[in-house]
Image (cartoon, rainbow, N blue to C red):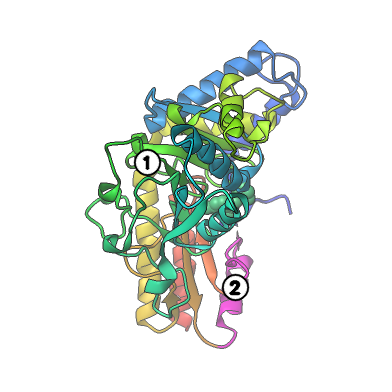
Amino acid sequence: STERVLNFGAGPSALPLSVLEEAQKGLVNFNGTGIGIAEISHRSKEFQAFLDDFEKNIRTQLGVPPTHRILFTQGGGTSQFSAVVLNLLARHRLLHPTATAEETVLDYVVTGSWSKKAAEEARRLAAGNATVRTVVDSRVYSKDGKSFDNIPPHAEFTFSDDPALIYYCENETVDGVEFSHDPQSPASFPFHLLKRDALVPLVADYSSSFMCRPIPHLADHAVIYAGAQKNIGPAGLTILIVRQDCIVDVDAAAKLGVTPVPLILSYKTLADSGSLYNTPSVLPIYMAGLVLQRMKEKGGLPYYEETNRRKAQKLYAIIHEGEQKGVFRRKVQQGSESWMNAVFEVLGEGAEKKFLEGAEKEGMKGLKGHRSVCVRVSLYNAVTEEEVDKLIAYMTRFLGES
Ligand code: PMP
């Protein structure tokens, strides 16, 4: 078929059609250079100008302060599971040259499959050099004692005294659990419990919620990172926002006994070279740059925040209605539901299959949840409110027939 369908996939996911069409042109002739974007040197002045503009666009729209650098790299969110550990262990060693493995603590907040994976990688890398602590594991507070279905209450977050890092995942893409951005909500991140007298080494994985709304307490973060392939572009680009004190001389730290950091994972390498230490992912940067330009034209983050809020509210309302009728069941506890990935079950023998097949017939794809059986609707920026309305109309009909 030559027709595009409605794509509710979790990532890689929908991109705006206007951007794809613009990128088609750039693929043949980038900004009037006569050379396609996948063919042009990353050191050309035209690409450098594009990169500068892209960075500026992120900085302005998110309000990134001058205390923080914006860096671009490859390797996805997964490469940052490793990079944050290595860079921040190096930083910690430079601050505490004689700290023992017991005194070098990495604090992990585990609220879903991705933060769990990040903590596992930390355990691999820190073995013998540092101690990985689970600050809180949300499964303990779940309805069934084993699911990631909630953000635990603030009182359960017990941070270490002087950790090398504090890690959390803002939006758990698989489980559909997200920290609330309403500071009054019990499901918000407990920023008030962090020690503010030092530069807190707070790390956040924003892979599936980057640029969908403003980032609360952005300036209090040491590292924020995101793979591009949800809200802003194709896979192959990872965006980092790194506070200056976390860009450290990893070789000086290695002399004090920490694991040497591969150059390409070192934030200092990226910062010193303006993210051009080696060949960057030119094409994903280009497409993400076009998405950012479009976001700016549409009114920036305030526009997306409002639209995304409405999209999520409407969708959860119909899921709720289906729950009252005994047709759907929400997977995530009230207040911890993600704006970007809504997960629910369709109850009854074969009902989920029927739901997914019916949706597919109407041109709605990507609704199957991650491996385990359930439905997941991803509502990234490129999914329009109209498209969500179409899905809701289908869900309403499905409820009527159930
Ligand atoms: N963190 C989160 C929250 C994710 O959703 C993903 C990917 N789905 C990752 C990390 C891993 O990212 P990547 O596949 O880019 O390595």
| Res 302 quadrant in image | top left
Q: CA distance from mark 2 to mark 1?
A: 30 Å
Q: How busy is the neighbourhood of tag 2: few (under 14 within 10 Å), some, or many (20 plus)?
A: few
Residue 76 is left or right of residue 116, and the answer is right
Is residue 296 something that shows in the picture? Answer: yes
Disc 2 marks a residue whose amino acid type is Ser
Image quadrant containing the N terminus: bottom right
Q: Nearer the viewer, residue 157 or 40?
A: 157
The residue sitting at 66% across, 41% down in the picture is 75
Mark 2 vs 1, N-terminal side: 1
| Residue 54 placement (x, y as % from top left) | 53, 25
Q: How busy is the neighbourhood of tag 1: few (under 14 within 10 Å), some, or many (20 plus)?
A: some
| Res 153 quadrant in image | bottom left
Above or below, 262 against 56 in this view is below
The residue sitting at 57% across, 64% down in the picture is 367
Residue closest to the far left: 184
Residue closest to the far bottom: 349
The residue sitting at 38% across, 67% down in the picture is 150
Q: Nearer the viewer, residue 395 or 225?
A: 225
Above or below, 90 against 371 in this view is above
Q: Which residue is mark 2?
A: 372
Dots 2, 1 in contact, CB < 8 A: no
Q: Which residue is mark 1?
A: 215
Q: Which residues are magenta?
A: 349-371
| Residue 162 placement (x, y as % from top left) | 37, 45
Disc 1 marks a residue whose amino acid type is Ile
- SS for tag 2? loop
Is residue 365 found inside the magenta-colored segment of the image? Answer: yes
Is residue 21 something that shows in the picture? Answer: no
